[in-house]
Image: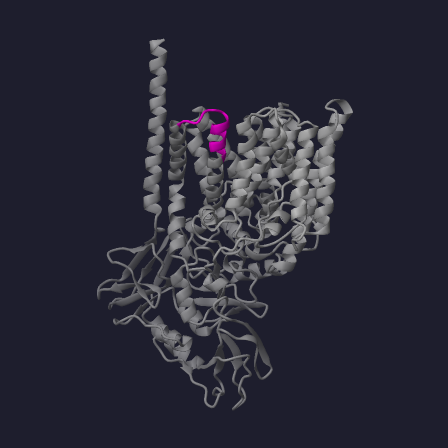
Amino acid sequence: MPKNSRACLLAALLSVVAVCGGDAVARVFPFGPRHRAVNDLANQFVPFHAHLWDLLRGRADGGLLFDWRAGWGTSFLPDYGTYLSSPFAPLVALFPRGDVEYAVYAVTVLKTAVAAAATTFLLRRLGPGAWWWAAVLGASYALCGWSLAEGTYNPMWLDGLIAFPLLCLVGEWVREGRRPLLGPLVVAVCWVANFYTAYMATLGAALVLLVRLAVTDSFRVRTLVRAAVTTGLGVGLAAPVLLPVLLGSRQAHPGLVREFAPVTGTDFLARLLPVTYGFATPAAFVCTAVPLLAGALLFRRDVPGRERWLWPGLCAAVAASMQWGPTHLLWHAFATPNGSPYRQTFVLSGVLVLTAWTTLTHGRPDRRAVAGGSAVVLALALAALPSPVLTPWALLLAGAGLAAVAGALLLPRRGRCAVLAALLVTGTLLGQASATTAYADRERLVRLDDYPPSGPEQERRAAALAAADGWPAYRTDPGLPRVAGNDPLLLGGQGAAYYSSHTPAVLTSVLDALGGGWTSRGRNLLGLDNPVTDALFGVGARWRDGGVVRTETFLPLVTVRPPGPPPAYGPSPFRNQELLLGSRVYEAPHAGACRVGTEVFLWAPDATGPARLGDREVRLLGGRPKRQAAMVSLGLQRTPGLRPSLPGPGELGCLDHGRLRAAVAALRARAATSVEVTPSGMRAVLPPGGGTAVVAAPRIAGWRCENAEPAAYGGLLALPLGPDRTELSCSFRPPGLRAGLAAGAVAVLVLLSRAGLRTFRRRGTASAG
């Protein structure tokens, strides 16, 4: 087997062993009873991959452009481009639907292995060195702290981990004037896979290219122009996905806006060591061999001066840029992210590994350089001692690793000593990475929100929802208790619950006005269990109290309202529901108590704690602006004068179910006689007479209807009708898709023109010869 292939396979194997070994030590899924269902992994990535499984198997309600399941109907292409456009994502379809968590874990490990192999290939491409050292350093990059602590539960980011070495390889092709067609294609794949981390990887690769140009005496303006053209063409090829993602973000409900505050220097340095954790600190750990070799470069007199200083200087510059506000914004596309503010940390790990390899390309360092590199590592560790992030295990493993790697570098280079050196370095990598994985696994479960993992109960619930499904005649809501932020995607059915970076502002506004609940400042919509909203949005079945509950009090997907102005929402969700329904169905409580026979509803968005009516208790979790408690039912009023006990200020509404049934019957008389949904639109047959056709879906940007401009009716999709119009046909195209396709077509034409020009020149040269 060629040494390059051998090195890449070894790097991939080391990364798999370290990740799986660490998870096994922590007894975390799939190697033990502790689950991985934390934060966005449970809320977004697993449900979105479950929906991708449905989409690939032809079982989804919707298509690539539009999703009918979540958020009462939302644009799907931006979500696809944000969470699912990785080339590895379709592999989930190879697993059973009930094993989607196993599928996501397998894809996560596979991405880590590919990142290790890609980095190893890059290192071998950049200069000579022992093949096993290339494998160890390639795996060290893939097993950096960012990958083990952050990427493992944000698996879409791991595509950026792969993108960095690939884009550095493209930089080499640009420097050498080679592969003008393959380069833009690689850029395009990286940007489509995950544009967010690919942007950071592109910045890092650009810095690496500048250093390579400087140290190889190949710095030319035309090379920089060639690099810019290659990147621009690649991004242009990715534009059909990138532009809808960008516009989807602009139309999303605004998230948390934070001012960047750099961490203390001691915390920053502490995270360079193994077995540390911190949600708001940079997970900069790489195997101790990396900083030792990177530091040793400064003490090698046999290395040319520019190479000796520019590579460590690049490491220092990247580290410093992470702590300065303007460059922090540059790394994050000029917006401080919600959550971890150091998402570019993998680039620092990458340049450290490249610097370490540069040391080895000039031969193994001598004793003076090894001593100097060891002193650098010791100095960094000593400076980190005051940090509360530091753990005793971090110091122990860092010290043992430093001794092992330094000893390996000083051993003779032949025979058994060479084997022993390889074992010492490889053991250091596996031990530190596995321990860091296990520690991060344990800390995440303690520090982050966690959710119920998949299991028999979720499978039973999904099966019951599938059996009750009647879409598009009616919606089946996955109901409560909530499993994750995207239960309609995970469990099935069609509901209001939805959590994404692209949650439309209009959807949040509508749900808020009608009494819905949310977290994450309005981006994680929790849905609403209420008979009036169920009627308005055509919910004919929902999960409640351990089973599916059916109702006949629901409206078709399309209704026709009388001519007149659309409803204007006010502060009361009870009144807003009535405005959208067109009838009064709630009564005000008398002396704090509802009339016997009505259903008592409570709207207390900022309350936290139990609310009681008789023997029924409901717990609320509110408190704006971070979260809002949904309107809840306290049950039927059975005892005259019985007043509820509330955890805080709130508004009561007394629902008269007789009035609701009458209102629904009146609207059904003017509803669509047939409704057909498509993967990217809908058609309906309507009764004659005119008015306003209202679709029970939010009026998000991208809807187009035949022969008329769609409007909004209380935030829902609507269309004014003439007296003779009896058909409604609307389709959805995500904003930015047409412009993205045009940009992609231009990029393809330019690439083809370049290919044709190169062919013409080659033939001309051959003819002249």
Direction right: furthest residue? 416
Number of dots carrying numbers: 0
- In percent of width and height, residue 355 lies at 58, 33
**Magenta segment boundaries in residue numbering:** 208-220
Characterize the magenta stretch by its predominant secondary structure: helix
Q: Nearer the viewer, residue 307 or 560?
A: 307
Q: Is residue 19 visible?
A: no
Name the image quarter holding residue 746.
top left
- In percent of width and height, residue 222 lies at 38, 27
Q: Is residue 75 above or below residue 363?
A: below
Direction top: furthest residue? 769
Name the image quarter holding residue 554.
bottom left
Q: Is residue 355 above or below residue 535?
A: above
Instruction: Identify the residue at image location x=66%, y=34%.
Output: 372
- In percent of width and height, residue 345 lies at 55, 45
Q: Is residue 763 left or right of residue 185?
A: left
Q: Nearer the viewer, residue 703 or 765?
A: 765
Quarter of the image where the C terminus is located:
top left
